Image (spheres, rainbow, N blue to C red):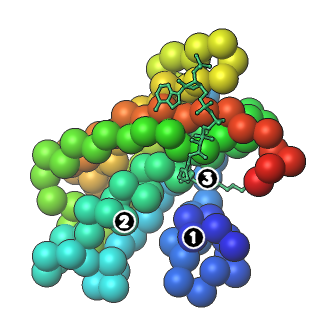
């Protein structure tokens, strides 16, 4: 019951993903239950949105992974109650094992309040 994408997780984000060319995308509207400061989405949940979107880029390619490292740059607050677009892509791959991923959040006016970079390591799906 994944917190990011399961339809059955009662407190999950219930994200749905699409692949468009080399980008994986999802949309999300944060509510007041997702706030940190009043009116703005909690930073940890923003990171979860981006982590999940990068993981799904790899899932779409049948690659089983774990997040090994992630850096998030918060440049602007992310308001609640507006549609956020989250997109991810792969920047580099090493030895078919280590994947350098990137993600960003886009506001309806085109501003990019948050970007992330992460390293994902391939794992044995039997161990999931
Ligand atoms: C139906 C759809 C559902 C879809 C459901 C989608 C769910 C998605 C969930 C979102 C993703 C997550 O949040 S995942 C949850 C958060 N992440 C985790 O809990 C991960 C916890 N960490 C681990 O389990 C482990 O450390 C792993 C699996 C990441 C790696 O362990 P390992 O496989 O034993 O690998 P290890 O020997 O340590 O390292 C292998 C090689 O990689 C290198 N390496 C290790 N870490 C790094 C690193 N950060 N940066 C560079 N290189 C690294 C090592 O030096 C080594 O190099 P060399 O010696 O080979 O040269």
* Chain-order first, disc 2 or disc 1: 1
Nearest to the eye among marks 1 and 3: give it: 1
| Contact between labelled residues 1 and 2, with CB atoms less than 8 Å apart | no
Image location of residue 41, percent across then percent down: 26, 69
Q: Secondary structure at mark 1?
A: loop
Image location of residue 15, percent across then percent down: 57, 64
* Chain-order first, disc 1 or disc 3: 1
Q: Is residue 20 visible?
A: no
Check the image and name the residue furthest to the right.
126
On screen, residue 51 above or below 5: above
Q: Secondary structure at mark 2?
A: helix
Q: Quadrant of the N terminus?
A: bottom right
Whole-number angstrom distance, CA of label 2 to CA of label 1 = 11 Å
Q: Which mark is residue 17?
A: 3
- Residue drawn at (14%, 76%), measured in percent from left and top? 37
On screen, residue 78 above or below 67: below
Q: Is residue 128 visible?
A: yes
């Amino acid at each position: 019951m994944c917190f990011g994408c399961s339809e059955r997780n009662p407190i999950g984000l219930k994200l749905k993903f699409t692949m468009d060319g080399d980008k994986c995308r999802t949309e999300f509207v944060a509510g007041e239950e997702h706030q940190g400061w009043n009116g703005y989405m909690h930073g940890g949940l923003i990171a979860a949105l981006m982590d999940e979107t990068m993981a799904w880029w790899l899932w779409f390619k049948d690659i089983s992974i774990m997040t090994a490292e992630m850096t998030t740059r918060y440049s602007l607050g992310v308001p609640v109650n507006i549609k956020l677009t989250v997109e991810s892509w792969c920047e580099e791959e090493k030895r078919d094992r280590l994947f350098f991923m990137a993600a960003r959040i886009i506001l309806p006016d085109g501003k990019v309040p948050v970007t992330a970079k992460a390293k994902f390591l391939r794992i044995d799906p039997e161990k999931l």
